[in-house]
Amino acid sequence: TLTEPVLLTITVKQTDTACAGLNTSEVTVTPSGGHGIPHSYTMTGPGAYSKNQATGLFTGLAPGAYNVTVTDAFCSTTSSITVVEHPKPTAFAGDDTTWHYGCNTSIELNGTATGGTPGYSYSWSNGATTNKTVVTYNGLGKDSTFTLIVTDFNGCKDTDAIFIDTMDVRCTVPGSPNNYVKICAYVAGKGFQTICVHCARVPWYFANAQASWGDCPIPKENEEFRVTDAYKVYPNPSH
């Protein structure tokens, strides 16, 4: 009496999903029925991908459509699967900026995350673990870069950095407390002058005297622009 063997069937399942761009997803192929073991497993996929092996675990897979064939002593069967990847988040540490240190003794960095799978965590290079971090002047140096790593719910990561150019604009007025800064501003009858003003007066000069931070630039030849010695302005001048 001839007995027909049980039909060989296979289950193909993606058992590990990588983050986009890593190409490390995994697929597990499980046979049943057929004419027992051993089995051989062949997978073909995107590009020239082709692999034949004795086990049903395929690793290091890029996203795309794959065909899997399992063969036993007498039969073979084929199935297909589309491998997907988790989308990556996008980290944004902020736009590069110049910090005019004087009136403000610290600066707040505000990182954001988009894309990926919400449920983000944050890690700054200064040790902060929230999307916002406060940076103080001490030890900052003139040029500093702060790196933000964002991790989403699936463990996918992205990195961004912000560059801070620190410009120390502090100045002193004899006999007065701190909180004075150096700006370049238009002074009536004198033209643009480098002046030392109290922090409380800075907004007025920026609104009314074409002010900018720090020393006045050296004028080019034939420009009607004059720089003289520092001009001390005490709090609450009439102009």
Image (cartoon, helix red, strand yellow):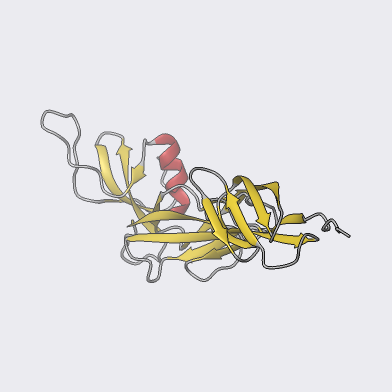
Left or right, 219 with reference to 38: left
x and y percentages locating residue 163 in the rendered image: 39, 54
Judged from this view, the residue extending furthest toward the left is 221
Q: Residue at x 53, y 60 (%)?
A: 149
The image shows residue 189, relative to residue 110, as above or below, that is: above
Point out the image quarter for the C terminus.
Answer: top left
Residue 24, image quadrant: bottom right
Judged from this view, the residue extending furthest toward the right is 1
The image shows residue 127, relative to residue 97, as above or below, that is: below
**Residue 220, can we see it?**
yes
Left or right, 210 with reference to 85: left
Q: Residue at x 41, y 66 (%)?
A: 137
The image shows residue 205, relative to residue 31, as above or below, that is: above
Q: Residue at x 22, y 42 (%)?
A: 217
- Residue in front for this viewpoint, 177 or 17: 17
x and y percentages locating residue 193 in the rendered image: 26, 42
Residue 184, image quadrant: top left
